[in-house]
Image: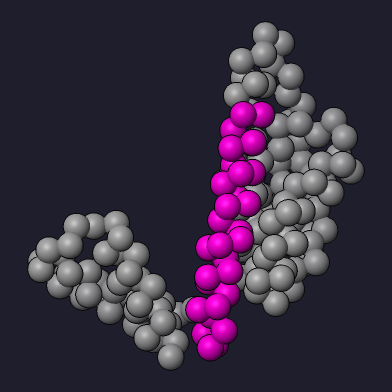
């Protein structure tokens, strides 16, 4: 199941990003097969029967929330850049996460990093260290940064 699911994800991603011609399909299948063997032997993970349901929930719930937060962050950073006095107060914020699994924490850290103005720098146990463009109210920022992401990730991937 692990090999099959990994191959499907890799091959499907390849087909979405490339053209669909016979040569592309053959190359994609070969590359996906090689990567499947390498990944499944080097990385420890498991695939269970709930994965398709989780992926559908992820696409229907998490992706729209992420896109909305992405737009809001882009506008926030654009306003800061265009402001005459450039109102930034960069610094680090330590955020406690209640997520348990490594995949959940990785997804949260990547989501925070992909939103403009924030960058996940380190993960230490249940704490995530984030660099942000404005740390004037560190406690409020810590509560706000990734809170929506964490709530949804915790429900979908528990």
Residue 113 seen anywhere in this rendered image of the structure = no
Taking depth in this image into account, of 109 and 73 the one nearest to the observer is 73
Q: Is residue 122 above or below residue 44?
A: above
Question: Residue, x 87% and y 41% (percent of image)?
Answer: 140
Q: Would you identify the image quadrant in which residue 36 lies?
A: bottom left
The magenta span reads: 47-76
- Residue 86 colored in magenta in the image: no
**What secondary structure is the stretch in magenta mostly built from?**
helix
Residue 82 seen anywhere in this rendered image of the structure = yes
Taking depth in this image into account, of 155 and 35 the one nearest to the observer is 155
Q: Quadrant of the C terminus?
A: bottom right
Q: Is residue 16 left or right of residue 133?
A: left
Question: Residue, x 73% and y 54% (percent of image)?
Answer: 148
Percent x, y of residue 71: 59, 37
Percent x, y of residue 3: 39, 86
Q: Is residue 82 left or right of residue 44?
A: right
Q: Would you identify the image quadrant in which residue 38 lies?
A: bottom left
Question: Residue, x 32% and y 69% (percent of image)?
Answer: 12
């Amino acid at each position: 199941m692990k090999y099959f699911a990994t191959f499907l994800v890799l091959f499907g991603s390849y087909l979405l990003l490339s053209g669909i011609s016979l040569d592309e399909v053959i190359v994609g299948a070969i590359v996906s097969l090689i990567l499947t063997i390498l990944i499944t032997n080097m990385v420890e993970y498991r695939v269970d029967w709930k994965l398709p349901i989780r992926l559908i929930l992820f696409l229907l719930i998490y992706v729209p929330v992420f896109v909305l937060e992405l737009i809001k962050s882009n506008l926030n950073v654009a306003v800061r850049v265009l402001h005459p006095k450039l109102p930034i107060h960069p610094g680090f914020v330590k955020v406690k996460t209640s997520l348990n699994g490594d995949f959940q924490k990785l997804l949260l850290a990547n989501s925070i990093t992909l939103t403009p103005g924030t960058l996940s720098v380190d993960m230490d146990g249940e704490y995530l260290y984030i660099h942000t463009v404005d740390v004037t109210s560190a406690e409020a920022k810590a509560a706000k940064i990734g809170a929506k992401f964490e709530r949804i990730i915790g429900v979908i991937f528990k």
